[in-house]
Amino acid sequence: MLGKEEEMKTKRGILLLIALAIPTTLALTTYRTENESAVQVEVEGSSAVVVETEPGNVQERGEEILRKMVEVNQYWLFGPTSDVKNYSYEFLLVDNAPRTIEVSKPANTSSSFRQGISYYTVLHKLASEPASAVITAIQEDGRTIRLDFSLKDSMKIACGNGISGTWRGYFSSRVDMGSLWLDAEKMVPIKTVSGQVEEYFSNYVTLEQSHYVPLVIRIDQGDMHFSWKFNLYEPGLWLFDMADYQLREEGVKLPVASVENVKINTKPAQQNQLPVVIIAQTDESTSLRRMLAEGRKKMEIIIKTNHTWLLPSLDIRQGLVYQYRQEEPYFETVMFDEQGNIMVQLESSKESPDAPTRQLFYQPDGTFIRTRFDEEFVRLQRISDDEQILGKSLIQKDRYVRNLATGLNFDCALTRMARNPEIFHAKFEPADDNTYRLMLTTSSREAKIFTGTMLTFTSWAYMHDVRYAKT
């Protein structure tokens, strides 16, 4: 029967209910504040039952939902299972040196170090302090639950591709209200919205029967888009795996951070660490790592095959002296001595046609001095802060050294890949039987083009500091 109307008077007004005869049961529960009674409606066939609840129950029901959510999601919102006593991992952020993170007491460790990524939002506030929110509305349709809330005190949320100190993509803001969507059956978060920040959770896997952890979290904030993958390790550690970062919808999606060398429950006297067991990880993460490993091998082959001109030998240049001349009166003298030192000097210029002015001097240990001919004191600098890179490996990291070895200022993605392959991700794409394409992506701020008619101090036509993300 269609179009049956019923009017029911309540204590605060009139509720108009239109019930349609359908073959299955429809259950809709809505809770409201602001002097409205909460009403539960059940429609089965052509009959309707209305149950009125007290106005204050919206807060009680909201906190009850949050407590259930916390119970089910505790092993990723608060920390690993009690069987995880300690763990460590290496955090890699684009072109930064790997950073070893040790977590000796998970329960007393800040969330960024515990999770492996900077991630703290309104969801964590609701989970740790359900009473900190005033629940303004609840909608339940049997499949999902939506909670609208206002925080009693505003809070600062912060997310970024990093752990502390350095990030590649980061934001923080204050929020005081939002909405949370939950799966009604599993009681796991599906989505949150607070201010301009949206979070999406997916790829849940089971841990200890009635608990769940997400393997994918996506965060959107204006033009910033984070896509995070997580792994679940035995005996119950949920830990960051890798991050993609996209700036603006049309921007390049770049892998910017990852975790390697995970160790769990090590003992001080333990010599050999048992291999960790990954209980669950995303298919995308597995295929991406396989693709990047294949691309890495291709990069190594290209560098080795083209080593003579991409990474020219400095040893065979010992004793080499040459002059680089451009428009008169500019010219530079380049010298490679027998001990491995390299020096270039601007011998003549329009400002000083008869006397040398600027100098650049490299030592074989990777230190260098940039100065003027008449300066009494100089400052010794190091090419890289990474103390693990020494000697020839360090000095060949500098683009000026390569320029001096070849006689021209020419630095593009290919030469940079040879010097710093660690800042690139490579995707192998077969073209035909004889050729293939290697797509390089990088989020390093130092990935720039410097090329033109120039050596060290003198330029005629020169393009410099042109950043690129893909080549």
Image (tube, helix red, strand yellow):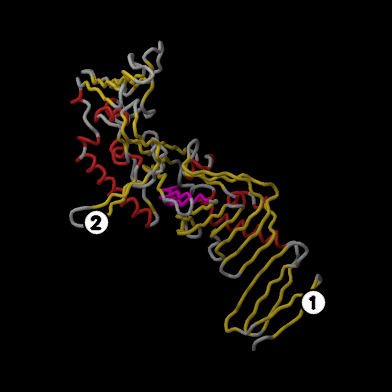
The residue where tag 1 is placed is 9
First-in-chain label (2 vs 1): 1
- Compared across the picture, whether 389 is left or right of 133 comes to left
Crowding near the residue tagged with mark 2, few <14, some 14–19, many ≥20 C-alpha atoms within 10 Å: few
Q: Is residue 235 magenta?
A: yes
- Compared across the picture, whether 230 is left or right of 417 comes to right
Residue at the image point whose x is 46% and y is 47% from the top? 83
Task: Determine the CA span between mark 2 and mark 1.
Answer: 73 Å
Crowding near the residue tagged with mark 1, few <14, some 14–19, many ≥20 C-alpha atoms within 10 Å: few
Residue 78 in view, yes or no: yes
Magenta: main secondary structure equals: strand
- Labelled disc at residue 54: none
| Part of the protein shown in magenta | 223-247
Q: Secondary structure at mark 2?
A: loop
Q: Give the image location of residue 225, x and y in percent.
A: 49, 51
Residue 241 in view, yes or no: no
